[in-house]
Amino acid sequence: MGALLGHRCSVLPNQPFSRQIWLFSKDISRRNLKTARKRQIMVLLLAQLSAQSSCNLSRKQTPMMNVSEIYASYLESTLIGVQREEANLYVVRALRHVIQDVFAQLSPTLMIMAATRSSMLDTWFQHVIGVLLSTWSDGTVQMLRANGTQSVHVPGRKYCNLLLVDSYESLLDTRIAEDNAGYDDHEYYFIFLQTRDQYIERERQLILEYCLAHYWLNCNVMVQTAQVEVLVYSYYPYQEQRCQLAEAQLVNRFDGQRMINAPMFPNKLRQLSQCPLTLLLWHMPPYVELSPGRTAGGFEMQLVQHLAQRLNFSLVLHKLHLLRVDQYKLAMANGSINGPIELIMQQRVNMSIGYFRKTARRDQLMTSTPAHYYAPLVAVVESDNFRFGRLAWLTFPFQWPVWQTLLAALLLHWSVYVWHWRRLGLQVVELLLGVAVPRLPRCWLQRLVYAHWLLGSIPLRIIYQSLLFHFMRLQLFETLPSSFEQLLSSNFRAFCTSNTLQMLREMPQVDCHYDSFTGFTTSYDQNVLDALQHNRSIGRRSFAIAGLDVTKAHLRDTGQEENYHILTQYVNVQQVVIYMPKHTYFYSEFTNLIRRLDASGFIDFWRRATFAESVHRNQRRENNEEELQQQEHRRRIHETQLTAIYGVMGSLYAIAALIFCLELLIHRLFNKT
């Protein structure tokens, strides 16, 4: 050591004092010496240079540098003030193991961020990252640095994150929560907390509570104790008697080469220990049927109950009554701060069901599972709007060219007979209609013409009467439209719920005809279908847009299947999902379970069973009502029916009397002449 000091003093005889200290400390750092040996050399150096500075002061009158300041500068430059170099390398090996064996299996990119408000720790973090990157270079790394107010925020999603912080406040400086808040699936956070042992427990608890509040499920905190132990802590949000708590638990330990437990990020949602989850729902049969008690049924409720059974959690029902559906605006609430979207965004509930349809705007605000039911929206129109008129009934059997030819032949023969034989002009019409001719003409040419008309009119009358009877028996209609655009072009008006209208407005076909749509302040498609019948009574042409299954069930229950026509082309296909708060814990678990249930056919079976049960229940109620109506009908015949019968018969008798009077008058006029 003496030789080393002598060598250094001989090399730097004319250098300034501070320059000598800096060069010598740099030379010691490069030498392969232990930390204790370096400190001994530094102490001897300080003693020698202190004496030298005294001599220089007497000769040149230069001020002497404080020994404590020199030593502090040396500690900061050589990083001895943080910890020994062996401990630094131990931490680097632990971090390299996390990067190579954990993050490299999850993503090809990695984000490393160092955040501290201490200049000494900032230098130490840079040193650790430099040593870490010098031993590992396989991957794409994004490096960020946050130093209080001097940090520059870099937006964008950060999937695999290695954070080096010294406190909870430094973690807040990273602003990483706002960068990942808009995504559904979970990221991975490995936080290295470097602080004194007396602050570890408090800072670690604050960090874990921060992870819990922002739904960071895969969040581990690594600490290094004074005994150079590298420990990894995490939290389990749902444990028995400790639900929704961020209690720190030791999950791993570094033994110098590897972590002793293989899964760095264990599955924390395999067992929820009967912890309560709040379910937001509203009455929307047959998807959700609420009873006066605390129970609920329906197709979607059965699905959620199965999820609760598989993950072992209990349900707390938060029943909501949708009121002001017409006031759906940007937040798509029901006109108040307690709307379904607001309750989910404020994390006051864990999930929501009730024919909750998926939209792009809602996906920006909340997290949704894969669609468990695809609900086609169809256009429903009354068949009476396409019935043939009275004139169309009479002209239906033949096409217009046939009628035109027949009318031209009739006019030609009639004009000839009226010109030559005025009295026999109407006999051609009588032959065409199948009326018997009371007196045959004497001319053989006229008889030949009559025979031609008689033989030609018999097949025409048979065909006409047969087709007319067939038409009246089958109740045929005009060509029915196949899309709702054809109805809109025919001046029909569309009815639907306000919620459905808001979602349909994103379609160009609807937006260009938005004035032809009317939104009802209701949540039920059944009310929209009932409005069609009322609208027909006031003489307006309209159609409804509703769910296919709900429409079929409602028309079947009310016995009006023959009175309505469902267009073959779908208006849109709505995806019914379970909505949850953004970045929720249960996105991955619910997604996997719902996909397995859908692939196995359970969801389709539950849906068909629920709809069938609803139909049978409504049919039983309808049958009871029909029995009461039949009993009432047996007791007395409705007055309107008798009035209609008497009116028809009176009209027929009046027409017969009028014809009789006309024939009598014509007979007397001809007899006088």
Image (cartoon, rainbow, N blue to C red):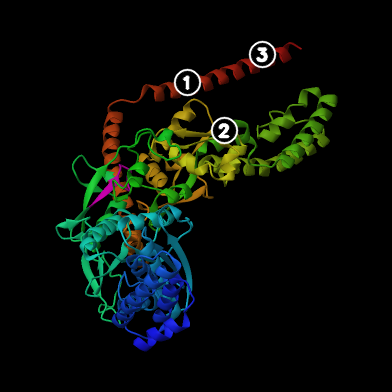
Q: Give the left or right position of residue 493, taking residue 111 as reference.
A: right
Mark 1 or mark 3, which is nearer the start of the sequence?
1
Q: CA distance from mark 3 to mark 1?
A: 27 Å
Q: Residue furthest top?
A: 672
Q: Residue at x 21, y 48 (%)?
A: 316
| Residue wearing tag 3 | 665
Mark 2 closeness class: few <14, some 14–19, many ≥20 residues within 10 Å = few
| Residue wearing tag 1 | 647
User: Which mark is nearer the camera, 3 or 2?
Assistant: 2
Q: CA distance from mark 3 to mark 2?
A: 60 Å
Mark 1 closeness class: few <14, some 14–19, many ≥20 residues within 10 Å = few
User: Which mark is nearer the camera, 3 or 1?
Assistant: 1
- Tally the numbered discs: 3
| Residue wearing tag 2 | 515
What stretch of residues is rendered in magenta?
277-288
Mark 2 or mark 3, which is nearer the start of the sequence?
2
Viewport quadrant of the N terminus: bottom left
Specify the quadrant of the image occupied by residue 197. bottom left
Percent x, y for residue 477? 56, 41
Q: Give the left or right position of residue 434, taking residue 549 as reference.
A: right
Q: Is residue 169 above or below residue 252?
A: above
Q: Give the left or right position of residue 658, taking residue 210 as reference.
A: right
User: Can I make out residue 478 in this image?
Assistant: no
Q: CA distance from mark 2 to mark 1?
A: 43 Å
| Along the viewing direction, whichever of 70 and 135 lies nearer the viewer | 70
Q: Are marks 3 and 2 in contact (CB under 8 Å)?
A: no
